[in-house]
Amino acid sequence: PIPVLIAVIPNIIAVESAWHAMQAKLSLREQGGLTDGVRHTLRVQPGIDRIVDGLRDHRRTNLISTVLIGISFSMVLLATATKSGTVAWNLALLVAVMTGFIYTFHAQYTNLGVKQLGDRFPNLVLHAPTHHQTQLGSILGDLLSAHLDPDLELEWNNWKTKFNQSLMPGYDKKQALERLLYVLYLHNLGEVTDADVRNEFSSFMLKGKLEAILYEQDSDFNWRTLQRLIAHAKAWQPSAFNLLDRLQIDLLSGKPEISRAKWRMDVALDEMCVGGATNLFIVLNNQTFDKRNVTVEVLVPNGEPETRTHRFELAACPPPRNPLQLSSKNDEDCLDWLPRYLQKGVVLWMNIAWNRSFYGKTNIQVVLRDEEGIVLESKVLTTEVSRKTSNALRKRMLRLESARKIGEMDIPTST
């Protein structure tokens, strides 16, 4: 029985602890018993039902594991009490072996889910961004926020209030947050050093406030956990970060597309659309010196719906005329330009779906028109619509697990 207990008991304890901790947290929020002292009814917030269902699935998984191990162990005991070579003895061993194999595959299939129960943010991995704005104010800030579970989002809002209070006078709060996240994103990619990050932070944040904002190991939001949350959002929406990377390349290279064109439209879509649905991201900038009204039309053959139209008034956003450096002490650099450039443009996050009978390769067309309906630019994307989800979900789980490890790394020193 000891191997049986070793196999099952830790998982049961982990799941039951997570379940009761979540219920206690929801009750405390309803009573206003946490940090802000304000009552929050999280049970009706979008996404909570998915988290509850996820924990219930873990409990069902443990029940299945317990039943399989119990049957296998019982059959072994029955075989030891039965005369060897008899039909009952053979059947008991056969059932024991079969249930043992089934349990092995079951344990391997659910192993990643069990690992996630020890997460610092226990509900984060169970949450999915089912509700979000179509038009984002920024890529990193709004994407990160959209992928937080409702409880963690409350803590995020409290942290943003402290962050805003740590800024030097005159800095735009949204651009400063985007800049902070962008620098941490580049640091995680290895494109900037610890010293570069510290110098960048000191350029727009009050020195005495940095320690509490980014360097406290026990804080929910610090240098490493912010990097983890960025990587978490990237694990869900890798195509959105392709837009960010391509814009950075354009700014660094000074390509004609960014320095001379009147418009810059970039679109991104996953190569594989799982379950007949995906996310389309569009970044649009008016690079003239005057405000312009434009229309973005998205055509999705066999889609639901097949056509979507969005109209905007785009602020003027003249691009840099020369290539930028990634980081510069004396001149404007990419770290200055990119958050400002994105804020003056439009970032769209659209859910795309196909009818249930459709699968296979397909195209999506994004058309940009002016006020008179004249086509200014058009892009065609190719993707594979798949109805199978298991393989893609497992790959995402692995990406989420990699993101989690970032948050467990040591925080760089503040000096």
Image (tube, rainbow, N blue to C red):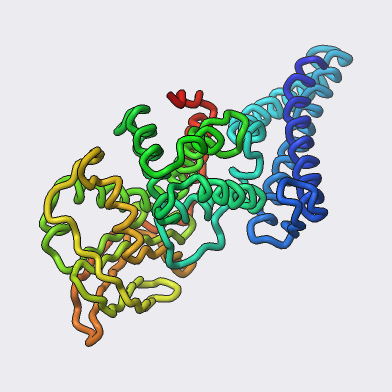
- Where is residue 369 drawn, in percent x and y? 24, 78
- Where is residue 5 drawn, in percent x and y? 79, 21
Q: Is residue 307 visible?
A: no
- Where is residue 171 drawn, in percent x and y? 40, 53
- Where is residue 96 drawn, in percent x and y? 74, 24
Left-right relation of 191 to 279: left
Q: Residue furthest right?
A: 81
Name the residue located 29 percent from the left edge and 47 percent from the top edge.
Answer: 245
Question: Which residue is at the front of the view, 157 or 150?
Answer: 157
The quadrant holding residue 287 is: bottom left
Left-right relation of 45 to 84: left
The quadrant holding residue 65 is: top right
Left-right relation of 366 to 72: left
Name the residue located 75 percent from the left edge and 26 percent from the top edge.
Answer: 8
Q: Is residue 222 above or below residue 89?
A: below
Name the residue located 56 percent from the left edge and 35 percent from the top edge.
Answer: 212
The quadrant holding residue 279 is: bottom left
